[in-house]
Amino acid sequence: AVWLDKTPAGYPSESIQRIGCPSLVIRGNNDFLLSANEALLVVNQLPEAEFMNVPFSAHATHQEFPEMVGFALNRFLSFTL
């Protein structure tokens, strides 16, 4: 329900701006819950965010392409730690 809540208390709300650590936003190109525009709105609100849009993938990108997501996470963490 939190993903579909369009009220001010829902996701993504202004509270996302309190995230102060580097963040990696990953979405599948065919994600039915998070559009590319919504993902970019999130990325643009975070001070140190990277964005990865995975082609041929839906909402469960980490399950559909675990090797690709794992590689991206390792790269991301190697630059942020």
Image: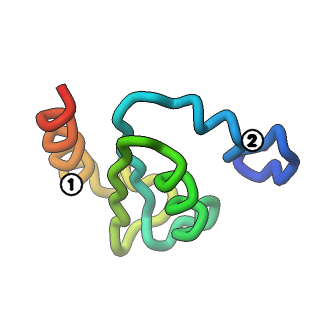
Q: Residue at x 70, y 48 (%)?
A: 3
Q: Quadrant of residue 76?
A: top left
User: In the drawing, does residue 16 fall left or right of residue 61?
Assistant: right
The residue sitting at the front extreme is: 47
How packed mark 2 is, by other alpha carbons closer than 10 Å (few <14, some 14-19, many 20 or more), is: few
Q: Which mark is residue 25?
A: none
Quarter occupied by residue 61 = bottom left
Residue 79 image point, x, y percent: 14, 37
Mark 2 lies on a secondary structure that is loop
Q: Amino acid at mark 2?
A: Val
Against 42, residue 70 (above or below) is: above
Work out which quarter of the rendered image holds the N terminus and state it.
top right
Picture colour scheme: rainbow
Q: Residue furthest top?
A: 81
* Residue under the image location 21 percent in, 49 percent down: 72
Q: Is residue 30 above or below residue 68?
A: below
- In which quadrant is the C terminus drawn? top left
Cα–Cα span, label 1 and label 2: 27 Å
- Name the residue nearer the viewer: 57 or 17: 17
Q: Earlier in the sequence, mark 1 or mark 2?
A: 2
Q: Amino acid at mark 1?
A: Met
The percent position of residue 36, horizontal first and vertical second, equals 52, 69
Find disc 1 in the rendering and name its residue: 68
Q: Are marks 1 and 2 in contact (CB under 8 Å)?
A: no
Left or right: residue 34 versus residue 71 is right
Residue shown at the point (34%, 73%) measured from the top left = 55
Q: In screen coordinates, is 53 left or right of 7?
A: left
Residue annotated with mark 2: 2
Label 1 sits on a secondary structure element that is helix
Of badges 1 and 2, nearer the viewer stands 2
Q: Residue at x 70, y 41 (%)?
A: 14
